């Protein structure tokens, strides 16, 4: 019997998901499992490596069981993963030396500030990696583990340890420790990868004091990557990409100038720039979109650290909603925020501000401020942050955008999507299948094993579900934008003045 599905593994920041994708790009079966977030100290965020693997493996098994099929019907496995999250483990035993340090973690901010103080170092890193110096990326996290975990540096220098972002860890586990690899898109998020030579940069490794032996082999995003040996029948792992590059591919933004925005834990906007690595003058990131058959597609990216996580904050910490989906109905109880603005800088401010010391603030509250105003302000903050990224992207690229494609959990929120169209003053297009990240991983895997012939063959797998066009009068919107920028400035003043108390 011919294989009829691609298994997409979507390993995210708060949950692991597994989806069976058929030849029409439809989800045939899926499973999801959340795992615990660890906060050992303020600003620190960790995951247990075994939780990442166990939930991913369990959901894969559950999806196959739901579909009533075995591994022989899987043509290939595609992996999409939370990026930058850093793991180090023993090459022989597979035992992690420390918890996974999550991309949101800020423990290395002071070290990054020291690096940023040297203009030459900042320029070298941005020119070679396309990244701005920030604790967000993997390099400073690796350095912290090697320096702070007893014996780790000595073991690394003896070649006994392996570093990986989450896809590397999953491939290691799936292949029973046979393959230590990463793909070009994930490598470009480490701050150790030269996006022009497409290789690990030895000078940057010396700067961060990281042995080259620690680093994985770099492979294309589609093709022969590894064999998953843990199923009853071996399955090729034939596609792999960081979640946001996977979503760009899943949204079929194959032409230069096309843009997608994903509304997940954070918000991530990417623009395909083709074969040109556009260097940003507005503190956006230049990143590898994907590499197929040796050909590299680049992207501009703006990262918002707190998107849907702001809604989770309303649910878990403020407890003003019981379930995340309730936020839209609560926000619709009022016509506006009544002048309330939330700057959800719980993990610092990302692009284009890049202030790791910023913290969340609420402005404009009165005695009449209640749950609906705060809920609406959190939703609007997601749109405002994405708007700031889009304006920077327009300026860097010179492209006059008329539409963006959207995906992710919060993209299902009509109130948010309409407000997003209004503040960006362009059309926001939501696809019929919102599983863009999983689809991207599946498309890369399917192309890698011939399940789909080429990119043109994938066109039938994408359709428009709803389009949101600007409707609100501009004077009102422009005033809100000005007030948002005032709130961001106030947040930055609070952060920058922290040493003068």
Image: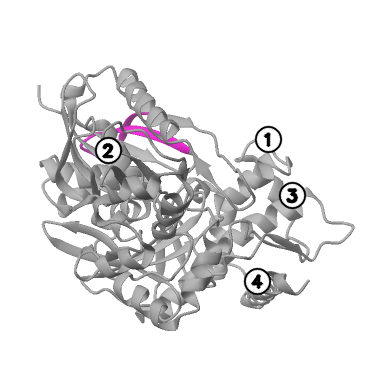
In the rendered image, which quarter contains the C terminus? bottom right
2 vs 3, front mark: 2
Query: Which SS class for mark 3?
Result: loop
Residue 29 lies within the magenta run = yes
Kindly indicate whether the residue at mark 3 contacts the one at mark 2 (C-beta within 8 angstroms). no
> Horizontally, is 399 left or right of 172 in the view?
right
Please tell me in which quadrant of the rendered image residue 66 appears. Answer: top left
| Residue range highlighted in magenta | 15-30
Give the mark nearer the N terminus: 2 vs 4.
2
Rendered residue at 29%/48% (across/down): 440
Give the mark nearer the N terminus: 1 vs 3.
1
What kind of secondary structure does the magenta stretch mostly adopt? strand
Mark 1: give few (<14), some (14-19) or many (20+) Cα within 10 Å: few
- The residue labelled by disc 1 is 322
Give the Cα separation between the discs numbered 2 and 3. 55 Å
Residue 333 shows which numbered tag? Answer: 3
- The residue labelled by disc 2 is 91
- Residue 136 appears at what percent x and percent y? 47, 59
Query: Which SS class for mark 4?
Result: helix
Kindly indicate whether the residue at mark 3 contacts the one at mark 1 (C-beta within 8 angstroms). no
- The residue labelled by disc 4 is 488
């Amino acid at each position: 019997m011919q294989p009829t599905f691609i298994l997409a593994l979507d390993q995210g920041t708060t949950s692991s998901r597994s989806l069976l994708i058929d030849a029409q790009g439809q989800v045939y079966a899926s499973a999801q499992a959340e795992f615990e977030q660890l906060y050992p100290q303020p600003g620190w965020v960790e995951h247990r490596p075994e939780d990442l693997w166990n939930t991913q493996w369990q959901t894969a098994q559950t999806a196959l069981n739901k579909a009533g099929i075995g591994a022989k019907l899987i043509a290939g496995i595609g992996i999409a993963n939370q990026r930058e999250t850093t793991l180090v483990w023993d090459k022989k035993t597979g035992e992690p030396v420390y918890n996974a340090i999550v991309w949101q973690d800020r423990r290395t901010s002071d070290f990054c500030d020291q690096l940023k103080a040297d203009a030459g170092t900042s320029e070298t890193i941005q020119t070679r990696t396309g990244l701005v110096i920030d604790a967000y990326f993997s390099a400073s996290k690796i350095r912290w583990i090697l320096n702070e975990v007893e014996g780790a540096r000595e073991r690394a220098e003896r070649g006994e340890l392996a570093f990986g972002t989450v896809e590397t860890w999953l491939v290691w586990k799936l292949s029973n420790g046979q393959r230590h690899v990463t793909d070009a898109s994930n490598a470009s998020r480490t701050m150790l990868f030269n996006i022009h030579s497409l290789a690990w940069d030895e000078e940057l490794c010396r700067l961060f004091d990281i042995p080259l032996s620690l680093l994985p082999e770099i492979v294309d995003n589609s093709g022969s990557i590894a064999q998953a040996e843990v199923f009853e029948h071996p399955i090729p792992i034939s596609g792999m990409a960081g979640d946001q590059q996977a979503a760009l591919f899943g949204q079929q933004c194959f032409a230069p100038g096309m843009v997608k925005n994903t509304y997940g834990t954070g918000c991530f906007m990417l623009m395909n720039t083709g074969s040109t690595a556009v260097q940003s003058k507005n503190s956006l990131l230049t990143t590898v979109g994907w590499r197929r058959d040796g050909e590299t597609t680049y992207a501009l990216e703006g990262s918002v650290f707190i998107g849907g996580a702001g809604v989770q904050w309303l649910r878990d910490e403020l407890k003003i909603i019981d379930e995340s989906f309730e936020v839209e109905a609560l926000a619709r109880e009022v016509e506006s925020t009544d002048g309330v603005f939330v700057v959800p800088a719980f993990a610092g401010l990302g692009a284009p501000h890049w202030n790791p010391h910023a913290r969340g603030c609420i402005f404009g509250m009165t005695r009449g401020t209640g749950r609906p105003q705060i809920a609406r302000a959190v939703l609007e903050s997601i749109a405002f942050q994405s708007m700031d990224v889009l304006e920077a992207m327009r300026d860097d690229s010179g492209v006059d955008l008329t539409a963006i494609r959207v995906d992710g959990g919060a993209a299902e929120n009509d109130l948010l999507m309409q407000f997003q169209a209004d503040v960006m003053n362009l059309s926001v297009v939501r696809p019929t299948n919102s599983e863009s990240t999983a689809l991207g991983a599946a498309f890369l895997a399917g192309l890698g094993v011939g399940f789909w012939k080429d990119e043109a063959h994938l066109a039938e797998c994408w359709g428009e579900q709803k389009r949101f066009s600007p409707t609100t009068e501009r004077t009102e919107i422009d005033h809100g934008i000005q007030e948002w920028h005032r709130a961001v400035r106030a947040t930055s003043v609070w952060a920058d003045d922290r040493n003068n108390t």
